[in-house]
Amino acid sequence: MSRIVTPYEGTGHRPWDASAAVPAPLCLHRTAVLPEWTDYNGHMSESCYLLVFGDNSDAFFRYFGVDERYRADGHSLYTVETSLSYVREAAEGEPLRLTVRLLGLDTKRLHVFHEMWHGGSGALLATAEQLLLHVDTRAGRVTPLPPHLYERLAKIRAAHAALPRPERAGRVIGIPDPSP
């Protein structure tokens, strides 16, 4: 079995333009629902939503400078928590448009929020909220982001802070206790 790759692997990243405005939210990834992503109901399988959100993360990482070269130098971002919300179904061939917002940032962590939209109707299909850690892969531990990446992320965070907080961010899974 071959390794899972993103559509962006091997593409590096464009140089960061510190003078450019940061879109809010960022829209860096578009795709269509592939036949192999559909299940026995004819809709996109739940695991494939996470696959597409992962591709969106990779596009986001490359936007601010994390690519193969950065990882080869011994650093990466690791996901430590993900929460998915499925809103509507997507069928084979339907266009998908992904957005991402940076909701929180400190020297070692990123809090991101993805939205998957139908590329034609504009309907919200799903969301994913993630907590990521910056890791020194050689030492096997969490480590601060280098200053140049932190500065880029701070600029992204400032642009995204102007947006209202996503309604689905920070949701907790559970069944309310019916007892009085």
Image: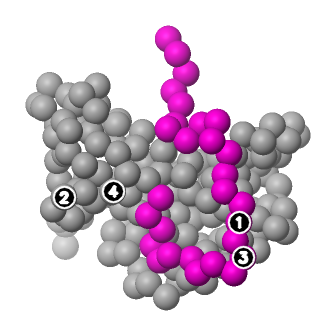
Tell me whether circle 4 and circle 3 mark residues in contact (CB < 8 Å): no
Q: Residues within 10 Å of mark 3 (few under 14, many from 20)?
A: few
Q: Residue at x 44, y 64 (%)?
A: 27
Tell me whether circle 3 and circle 2 mark residues in contact (CB < 8 Å): no
Q: Over which residues does the magenta segment extend?
A: 1-28
Q: Residue at x 37, y 66 (%)?
A: 171
Q: Secondary structure at mark 1?
A: loop
> Of marks 3 and 2, which one's residue comes earlier in the chain?
3
Give, as a three-letter code, the residue at label 4: Arg
* Residue sticking out furthest to the right: 139
Q: Quadrant of residue 123?
A: bottom left
Q: Position of residue 38 (x, y in %)?
A: 22, 31
Give, as a three-letter code, the residue at label 3: Ala
Which mark is drawn over residue 54?
Answer: none
Q: Position of residue 26 (x, y in %)?
A: 48, 68
Q: Position of residue 113 (x, y in %)?
A: 46, 64
- The residue to which callout 3 is attached is 18
- The residue to which callout 1 is attached is 16
Reply above or below: 6 against 15. Answer: above
Picture quarter with the C terminus: bottom left
> Of marks 4 and 3, which one's residue comes earlier in the chain?
3
Q: Secondary structure at mark 2?
A: loop
Left or right of 79 in this view: 144: right
- The residue to which callout 4 is attached is 97
Q: Secondary structure at mark 3?
A: loop
Which mark is drawn over residue 120?
Answer: 2
Between the residue at mark 4 and the residue at mark 3, the CA separation in whole angstroms equals 25 Å
